[in-house]
Image (cartoon, helix red, strand yellow):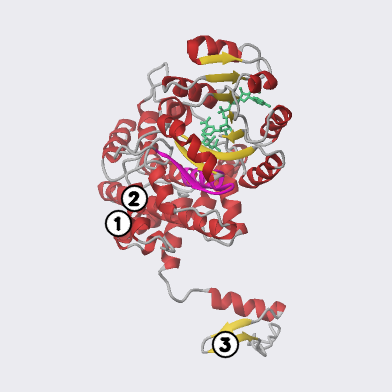
Amino acid sequence: MTALGLMGLGVMGANLARNLADHGVQLALYDPAAGVAQHLAQDLGSAGTACATPEALVAALAAPRTIFLLVPAGAATDAAIESLLPHLAAGDVIIDGGNAFYRDTARRQAACGASGVHFLGFGVSGGAEGARHGPAIMAGGDRTVLERLAPTFAAIAAKAPDGTPCFARVGDGAAGHFVKTVHNGIEYAHMQLIAEAWQLLRRLLRLPHEEVRDLFARWARGALSSFLMECAVRALDTMDKDGTPLIEHIVDTAEQKGTGQWTANAALEYGVAAPSLAEAVHARCLSALKDMRLAMEASVGAPTMAFAGDVKALVAALERALLSANITVLAQGFALIRAVDAEHGWGVDPATVARTWRGGCIIRSTLLEPIAEAYAAAPDLDNLLRDRVLWRRVTAGDAEWRQVVVTAVAHGVPVPVFSASLAYVDGLRTGRLWADMIAAQRDIFGQHGFARFGSPGRHHADWATLDLTSPAGGS
Ligand SMILES: NC(=O)C1=CN([C@@H]2O[C@H](COP(=O)(O)OP(=O)(O)OC[C@H]3O[C@@H](n4cnc5c(N)ncnc54)[C@H](OP(=O)(O)O)[C@@H]3O)[C@@H](O)[C@H]2O)C=CC1
Ligand SMILES: O=C(CO)[C@H](O)[C@H](O)COP(=O)(O)O
């Protein structure tokens, strides 16, 4: 196996180092914090060598060198690259394993390329546990370089249920980091759906904690089986020191580091409808307004939340609705990947992405297998909801999904991702939407023109005038 330099030995770097060492990779280690590299090297025994400076890290490796960065995205990544570049030679490789913004990756590829240094962007998912025992890795960049490195990374990656490593070159250029960004956008929406279900079960239906815990555990073993569902069960299983559920002590504000927002920004920039992914970001922003929410509730009151309907029926509906909404979120994520890939020409194969997400990553679930099959059978599929198998699974819970959204809205419980996802599906399956009225208004106030059935080209109308001061309010 190739010897590797690891730079940035925090949560991800240290755990990946242990994983790599387990697979026989000799490591040179560097971290700016005093003692961190030495401490880890001691733990790794003969597999790790601590280096005091970036220059020493480079010197510890044989050419062509490969250095894997696990540092915070943004300025820290630029600083790490700048500290390495003067010591590297043509043919060396820098891999950025952080959650980088894909345009930064493209810029860094160009800058490193000027010195003949290859720069690869790896989307790494799985958190601390994944890094230690098997992450999913979405690699982007030069095919030849990646072919050389693939055995090492395939060895440390998670294995899908069929034993395939969850490591793949997903495309050229910045494809790896873009695919990871969308992975995180999907992660936000799937997490939000679970949180909305939790809110309905616990705070609308007022089910006891243990009952919700058992329900989530049952869901986690069935069609909703996913890593995030398992996380939710773990969250409900954990008690505080006083024996009460820890979740009841956690402040209801969700932080975010930016990848969800990048996903929503990309959807807006490229004109891709991804309302569930955007709403999940908005939901976190709204959650952060804790003081304002408390003040508003104190002054105007929270919506009434008493539920007098059939609890059992709503619980069953929620399970079906979660499955339908989860698939819809994935459909939006894949549509976004396809659209942005088409612009950049990275050559992303959606089936490969789906296969890579089957294990190790945060959004791994049993849904990825049928998605991979759908794209393998029809690589040009323009939307996953057009696959018959997936469409049947989405619409099997159609009535239940509506019941969940209607009930939530009627009781004043916000379910932004359940409702945005349903509106997306309803919009997609409606041949004639409301946009005729938008087109008319645009032409009236801005002479922007409109398309007309049966008559090609742009049209303008001699719109009616209006006198709202007249009793009839007409023209
Ligand atoms: N944590 C997670 O679950 C996941 C994180 N990621 C991504 O992986 C990357 C690393 O994350 P994580 O391990 O959690 O972050 P941590 O903050 O735990 O670790 C980052 C490490 O990088 C070091 N560092 C900072 N600047 C430099 C530099 N110029 N040169 C070398 N090392 C430097 C830091 O040192 P110091 O503390 O002294 O500044 C720190 O030890 C991030 O981009 C993150 O978004 C991806 C998937 C999952
Ligand atoms: O990349 C990840 C998982 O895939 C990281 O855990 C990331 O930090 C999650 O995003 P955020 O902090 O914004 O919730």
Q: Which mark is residue 167?
A: none
Q: Sequence order check: which comes first, mark 1 or mark 2?
A: 2
Q: Which residue is mark 3?
A: 456
CA separation, marks 3 and 1? 38 Å
* 296 vs 160, nearest the viewer: 160
**Residue at left 44%, top 67%?**
428
Mark 1 touching mark 2, by CB under 8 A? yes
The residue under the point 71% across, 38% down is 115
Identify residue type, mark 2: Leu
User: What whole-number distance in Å separates the C-alpha atoms at marks 1 and 2?
Assistant: 8 Å
Most foreground residue, 207 or 91:
91
Query: Depth-wise, is mark 2 or mark 3 nearer the camera?
Result: 3
Chain part drawn in magenta: 166-187
Q: Is residue 256 above or below residue 464?
A: above
Q: CA distance from mark 2 to mark 3?
A: 42 Å
> The C terminus is located in which quarter?
bottom right
Q: Earlier in the sequence, mark 2 or mark 3?
A: 2
Estimate the x, y position of residue 330 in percent, counting from the top left: 42, 52
Q: Is residue 107 visible?
A: yes
Where disc 3 sits, the SS reads strand
Pinpoint residue 47: horizontal percent, then vertical percent: 49, 15
Query: Circle 1 sits on which residue?
Result: 393
State the residue position of label 2. Answer: 323
- Residue appearing at x 69%, y 45% in the figure: 110
Quadrant hosting residue 380: bottom left
